[in-house]
Amino acid sequence: MRKVLVSLGIAAAVAVPVLTLAQDATEMPELEPWTCPEGFEGQTLSVYNWSTYVAEDTISNFEAACGVTVNYDVYGNNEELLAKLRQGNPGYDIIVPTDYMVEIMIGEGLLEPIDQANIPNLANVDPLLLDQGYDPGNLYSAPYQWGTIGVGYNVAAVGEITSWEDVWAYDGPVSWLEDPRGMMSIGLSMLGFDPNSENPDEIFAAKDYLIESGSNVVYFAADDGQAQLLGGNVDIAIEYNGDIFQIMAESEEGAFAYVIPEEGAQRWVDNLAVPAGAPNKALAEVFIDYILDPQVGADISNYTAYGSPNITAINMGLIDEELLNNPGIYPPPELAERLWSISALPDAENYYNDAWDELKVFLAG
């Protein structure tokens, strides 16, 4: 995707309590370019990440700075990542799991502890995003990007969306995320249950609710619902906010919109981590430090239109002002109660997987 520099309006404001009060940019020290530690020339780093999730030059600049080669693969959802690593790490050094998945992977011994002494740029992360319950003390992970799951839609075809009920009732093609926990949390919340319920009766009730609400679903998107929307295959896509803002930047102004439904939605934080058995853990920690450099981090967030955890970049004025002022990307804190986070629920994992499989079979039929 090209860099996001055009007007990015949204249909409703949301809130995420993650931004520390910024200092005046003139009070910040001058930014020094990131430099690679010596001794890594000729080495290889293997990265396994979500698609459309780095700037155009993020990887090439790292290769040039360190004199290394980066192998870069992508996955569509957390469950795909987990399934691959449960079979044994095929050779990845860096992965980017979402908050609850970090906790699951820690519990299963699938992550290597990181040496924070090798990641001085961890100091650039907003303190409100550190030391979270999924990784106390950030012993295994460092925040990468954050955002929400909401609704992207074609304005000319749909008109306006304000609620999840509007999505269910729409008489036209819709795509849902291939994200079992994310989608099931919507069903649970709409029924008045905890989005992190471990009660099988509630989980399967949410499954039934989503089946009843999904008669217009024509596609389950593995992190590509925005492409279906842009291509005209669907009129509505339940998607990650940055993915929708990326196609908004490619399109005529006002063609697409993004909304957090009035009933609420999921807020997530993706994290850099080193999988167990990583062939090059030392270079992986260098890469994490590189990503957390203020300019590098700002370039990624400016390009992908996701929220940056890098408070130094924000304070230094490195985030494009138009993006920083967009409440769909950096929402005001007073509305935070509308959002929820997903927790690791190992005892209920099979319930969610079974419910999701049944839902997909039914809707596909």
Image: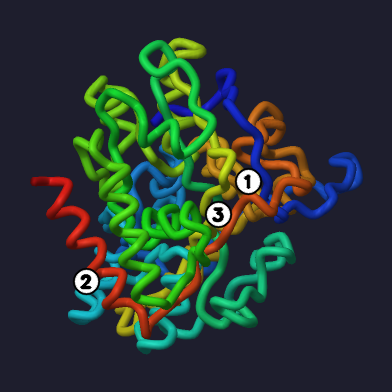
Three-letter amino acid code at disc 3?
A: Arg
Confirm whether residue 182 shows in the render: yes
Residue 154, above or below 276: above
Element carrying mark 3:
strand
Protein image colouring? rainbow
Q: Amino acid at mark 1?
A: Gln
Between the residue at mark 1 and the residue at mark 3, the CA separation in whole angstroms equals 25 Å
Residue 72 seen:
no
- 286 versus 115 height, above or below: above
Percent coordinates x, y for residue 270 in the rendering = 49, 60
Nearer to me, 100 or 32: 100
Q: Which residue is mark 2?
A: 84
Report the quarter where the N terminus lies: top left
Q: The disc labelled 2 sits on which kind of residue?
A: Lys
Q: Secondary structure at mark 2?
A: helix
- Earlier in the chain: of badge 2 and badge 1, it is 2
How far is disc 3 from disc 2 in space, using C-alphas?
25 Å
Disc 1 + disc 3, Cβ < 8 Å? no
Residue 357, given in percent of the width and then of the height, sits at 19, 62
> Is 264 placed left or right of 48 in the picture?
right
